[in-house]
Image (cartoon, rainbow, N blue to C red):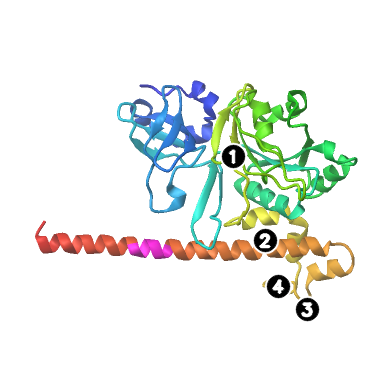
Amino acid sequence: MTINLSELADFGWKSFFTSQLETSDFDTFQPVRVTAVHRNALEITGLHAETTIPPFFAEDEEDRATVGDWLLIEPDTLRIDRILDRKSLFKRRAAGTGRHMQLIAANIDTLFIVTSCNQDFNVARLERYLALAQDAGVTPVIVLTKADLTDTPEDFERDAARLMPALCVETVDARDPASADRLTAWCGRGETIALVGSSGVGKSTLVNTLIGAQSIVTAGIREDDAKGRHTTTGRMLHRLPSGGWLLDTPGMRELQLTDVHAGIDDVFSDVAKLAQQCRFRDCGHDGEPGCAVEKAVAEGALDPDRVRRWKKLLAEDAHNSASLSERRARDKQFGKLVKRMMKDKKMKRGD
């Protein structure tokens, strides 16, 4: 079986993945893409395969397959040979007090950050999503829904656009195909788009509108606080009529950032640039002499709330990243111990 690269482009294949193939791979393996991940199975699709296969096991969470991944499999046995390097990866620390990392999606081109024109609109939450996108090298687009709930949707558009230079903001009616059409510029052949946002902002409705089918269950929001009910329970890639692929994600009650320091600096580039001008390299921007950040705040050139959010995200990212690094080091040492014990056991048995 010969790999047909031009036809694979329909599934999101790009030259980035071609560069990872060896000459022998073209006749030996079949590239397939992961469209959904279950506890005991992966759903895959490709030119000659649309089925489920056993998951790819790895001790390190980041080495396991996630939605959007490209795999090389043996055509006859469907055995996974390897996961190709990712063009982009979204991950977070799993909710709760554990130190596990959770993969969200791989090989995403554009991130639709969906929020509504009501109490759900939260600058701090949007900055978190933007930091994820920037760190992954993915194009972010703020998508505002439910503009009918306010008399001044332009206020929400203005506040969203201020979050980053040149940030694209689109206001759509998630129920109206004509209105949602303004998002198709990012949904062309082989392009992969992910939707993120809290529950109740209309993500599932928007997915249904974009794919042209009512395949995703939707629910309303609570009237008292405008918070939504969770209707999406898993991540899955959907094929779009425009030729792209759309990933819906469950509403995330807790989005813990991990290993996204560069993304945070991109989102808060104005604060980060000032921080480089501080007298001390390790300035905590909390009363130290010669602090350029505090000076800008005192002069009214910088929003103190924005500085607080920046410091909070950096502290959270540093804590979570350190926790995961410690766990990986501990797991690595444990793995070496097990291998050494198995080797000693074989030597005693004379194997």
Mark-to-mark CA distance, 1 and 4: 40 Å
> Which of the 4 quarters of the picture holds residue 71?
top left
Mark-to-mark CA distance, 4 and 2: 14 Å
Camera-nearest label, 1 or 4: 1
Q: Main secondary structure of the magenta part?
A: helix
* Label 3 element class: loop
Residue type at mark 4 is: Gly
* Label 1 element class: loop
Q: Position of residue 296 (x, y in %)?
A: 84, 66
Mark-to-mark CA distance, 2 and 3: 23 Å
Please name the residue shown 59% across and 64% down the image: 318
The region drawn magenta spans 329-334
Q: Position of residue 48 (x, y in %)?
A: 41, 22
User: Tag on residue 232?
Assistant: 1
Mark-to-mark CA distance, 1 and 3: 50 Å
Camera-nearest label, 4 or 2: 2
The C terminus lies in quadrant: bottom left
* Label 2 element class: helix
